[in-house]
């Protein structure tokens, strides 16, 4: 764990969201009895180390009319999978893109790209665009549509000495 | 699903597109972003509050990398018999390490993400679920991540 106690308190204070006030970092600082500048500097340092991946919004694709979400999965030749994955990840309609291990024989797919659309037809059109991009490096593919959200929370850093606060807030979509 | 009662207008969509990442680490960050979007600071804050309260955005703020904090994420999948699906859902969801869980139309019909504070936590949670359910939990840890944005027509 490369977070010191103060970093950790900042993570805990911001993981469910930033205050919607003109000086959000000052408000967090006041809660933690820190200076605004220290909160800003520590968040910047955590961003530089990759602890903070980004600061922004997590859209609820369903509420935005993107009611069809297809997890497209691809069997891509290993020697080109990393380069092609980067290209797929840059497509506007792909929200998440990862290389993952295969689980043979049931699961030959190593590239996962989440595609959102207003319906399955739109997802299918976008899937074709990925197929064209991958070209002959693609050995097979499938699309898994979600039929139900069974749970959606997010990572929550448990407060030290307390039960996990995982149930209290929703997280990355 | 929350949020369907509040259709976001084109300004909301511009806000969502602009705030995918890069929110400023400065004293008055909303004012900075508002200026770029030709909005007032007050209007931006008000719209973000409405988007958040209506569930149109699920969160606004820093997103932390579990691995960088010493923790881990792992996508997992199970092949759950249809007649046990609800019971297995309850067993799986009862684990606080399960962050998201989706039913999907496939032989592997349950897909969930484990998020834990330590890498060992992933194995412990996955093994626990296997013991409780008697079903195999396939692990798909990310080997590489290609991030990632999501843009809408504003």
Image (cartoon, coloured by chain):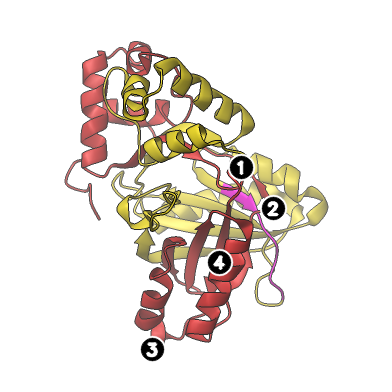
Q: Is residue B145 left or right of residue A114?
A: right
Question: Which residue is located at x 43 percent, y 55 percent?
Answer: A69
- Is A99 a magenta residue? yes
Q: Is residue B154 visible?
A: no
Give residue B52's position: percent from left, percent from top: 26, 38
For mark 1, give the secondary structure.
Answer: loop
* Residue drawn at 31 percent across, 53 percent down: A168
**Camera-side residue: A47 or A95?**
A47
- Residue lying furthest right in this view? A79
Where is B6 relative to B129, above or below? above
Of labels 1 and 2, earlier in sequence is: 1
Identify residue for label 4: B76
Q: Nearer the viewer, residue A131 or A167?
A: A167
Task: Note whether B123 is above or below A112 in the view shown.
Answer: below
- Residue A99 position, x and y percent, is 67, 53
Q: Disc 2 vs disc 3: which is toward the camera?
A: 2
Q: Which residue is mark 3?
A: B83
Pointer 2 and pointer 4: residues touching (CB < 8 Å)? Answer: no
Which chain's colour is yellow?
Answer: A
Image: magenta residue range: A97-104
Q: Secondary structure at mark 3?
A: helix
- The residue lying at 27 percent from left, 27 percent from top is A20
**Which quarter of the image is occupied by the N terminus of chain B?**
bottom left
Task: Indicate the colour of chain B.
Answer: red
């Amino acid at each position: 764990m490369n977070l010191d106690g103060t970093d950790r308190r900042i993570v805990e204070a911001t993981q469910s969201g930033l205050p919607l006030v003109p000086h959000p970092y000052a408000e967090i600082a006041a809660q933690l009895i820190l200076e605004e500048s220290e909160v800003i500097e520590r968040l910047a340092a955590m961003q530089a180390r990759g602890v903070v991946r980004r600061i922004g919004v997590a859209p609820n694709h369903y509420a935005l009319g993107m009611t069809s979400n297809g997890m497209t999965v691809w069997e891509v030749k290993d020697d080109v999978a990393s380069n092609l994955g980067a290209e797929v990840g840059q497509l506007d309609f792909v929200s998440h893109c990862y290389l993952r291990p295969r689980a043979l024989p049931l699961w030959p797919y190593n590239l996962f790209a989440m595609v959102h659309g207003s319906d399955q037809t739109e997802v299918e059109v976008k899937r074709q665009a990925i197929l064209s991009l991958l070209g002959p490096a693609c050995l097979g593919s499938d699309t898994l549509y979600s039929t139900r959200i069974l749970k959606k929370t997010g990572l929550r850093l448990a407060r030290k000495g307390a039960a996990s606060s995982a149930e209290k807030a929703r997280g990355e979509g | 699903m929350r949020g369907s009662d509040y259709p976001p207008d084109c300004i909301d969509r511009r806000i969502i597109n602009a705030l995918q990442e890069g929110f400023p680490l400065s004293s008055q960050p909303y004012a900075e972003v508002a200026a770029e979007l030709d909005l007032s600071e007050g209007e931006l804050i008000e719209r973000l509050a409405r988007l958040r309260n209506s569930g149109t955005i699920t969160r606004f703020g820093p997103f932390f990398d579990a691995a960088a904090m010493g923790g881990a994420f792992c996508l997992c999948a199970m092949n759950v018999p249809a007649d046990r699906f609800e019971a297995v859902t309850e067993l799986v969801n009862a684990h606080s390490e399960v962050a998201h869980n989706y039913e999907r139309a496939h032989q592997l019909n349950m897909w969930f993400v484990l998020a834990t504070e330590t890498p060992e936590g992933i194995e412990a949670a996955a093994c626990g679920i296997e013991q409780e359910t008697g079903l195999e939990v396939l692990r798909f840890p990310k080997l590489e991540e290609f991030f990632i944005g999501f843009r809408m027509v504003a």
